[in-house]
Amino acid sequence: MKVLGIESSCDDTGIAIFDTNAGLLAHRLASQTIHKKYGGVVPELAARDHIRTVLPLIENVLEDAGLNGDELDGIAFTQGPGLAGALLVGASLGQSLSFGWNIPSIGVHHMEGHLLAPMLEENAPEFPFVALLVSGGHSQLVDVAGPGQYKILGTTLDDAVGEAFDKAAKLLDLGYPGGPAIAQRAKTGTPDRFTFPRPMTNRPGLDFSFSGLKTYTLTTAEKCRSEDGTIDDQTVDDIAHAFQEAATHTLMIKSIRALKSAGRKRLVIAGGVGANRRLRELLAEQCNAAGFDLFYPRIEFCTDNGAMIAYAGALRLAAGEFLEGHRFDVRPRWSLEELIAIQ
Ligand code: KG4
Ligand code: ZN
């Protein structure tokens, strides 16, 4: 079964074709750059950019795969969670193509896409496992008993960790998106010049809180400003380093705790912050020491992409699920726990 995946939940248009027999046939991504000057994603601009990009990208991907549209067997689009206007672009086009080509369609949960992305790799995890889902909008620890069987073990009480990276980067004038910028500057940071707190790690439980780290970044930066209001480059590197250490240690401590409390042996990292090399390194070290196996998607499938949506949609379509009729409602807020098991 060949399934076209359409991702348009935020500021990336991702298109891919996944074949349940032959694997991933083609994938392309268009990342919007227009938001950089606003320091964050502007929803209306994101939706308009998806409209401009999505059809040409689908044509390119079909060409890459050597297929005509009428050779596809299904369409998967991101139905939520995400920005309503941006989601509507993928949903309306996905439903139109499904109607035009007379093939079934399915609305995919964006976080299920992230969570299943490691399945696209050669070293794919077996079920069950614990997933650390860390993106711009989510920080969750999820117990995954099987495909579609998700129980949220812990979540953020305020900012998502990717959002905290983005806000800290903004405070340091490092631009948007902040995660890669902080990671880059942290490389040349002096270890131990600043130590930031590891929020909520001293008490039991699996929830996160990241807004305090942002405040800590702000107050540290303010103390280091010279009279003309600037901060020297080395200090910016040092603050970025301290921020990254605190954020990644916090995620690592809670992930190991979640594995132990759920009685699982495998950990999956997914979502944009999963691209962070320091996080991968720390988790690899600690999983190794405690006898857990660690899995993650390749870097380009950590951040938003069409391949994960094509894959998750193909699993559900192949199991006989599809959307009735051709109405297109989107679900900007949607919990993973509402999904049904994939048979
Ligand atoms: O999954 P994603 O592409 O989009 C959402 O679903 O939100 O995640 C984007 C988030 C942004 O907050 C970005 O700053 C963060 O992932 N990110 C990183 C890195 N690359 C992207 N955070 C830390 N380190 C990175 N290398
Ligand atoms: Zn995402």
Image (cartoon, rainbow, N blue to C red):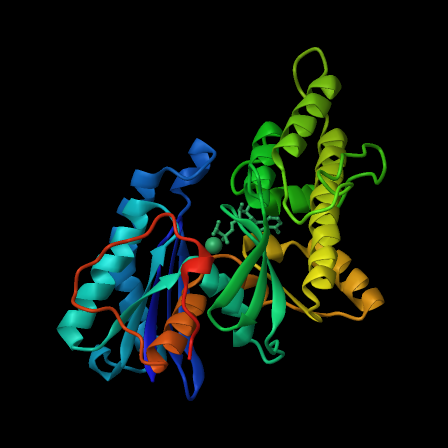
Q: Position of residue 65 (x, y in %)?
A: 35, 80
Residue drawn at (33%, 44%) of the image: 46
> Which residue occupies the extreme bottom position in the image?
21
In depth, the one of 76 and 200 nearer the eye is 200
Q: Position of residue 97 (x, y in %)?
A: 19, 69
Residue drawn at (54%, 50%) of the image: 135
Q: Quadrant of the N terminus?
A: bottom left
Whether residue 336 appears in this view of the structure is yes
Q: Position of residue 319 (x, y in %)?
A: 36, 81
Left or right of 249, for residue 24 = left
Left or right of 72, for residue 333 = right
Q: Position of residue 76 (x, y in %)?
A: 32, 69
Query: What number of labels is visible?
Result: 0
> Which residue occupies the extreme left position in the image?
100
Whether residue 231 appears in this view of the structure is no
In depth, the one of 266 and 221 nearer the eye is 266
Q: Quadrant of the C terminus?
A: bottom left
Q: Is residue 171 above or below residue 258?
A: above
Q: Is residue 168 above or below residue 227?
A: below
In depth, the one of 1 and 182 nearer the eye is 1
Left or right of 7, for residue 187 = right
Left or right of 205, for residue 37 = left
In depth, the one of 110 and 165 nearer the eye is 110
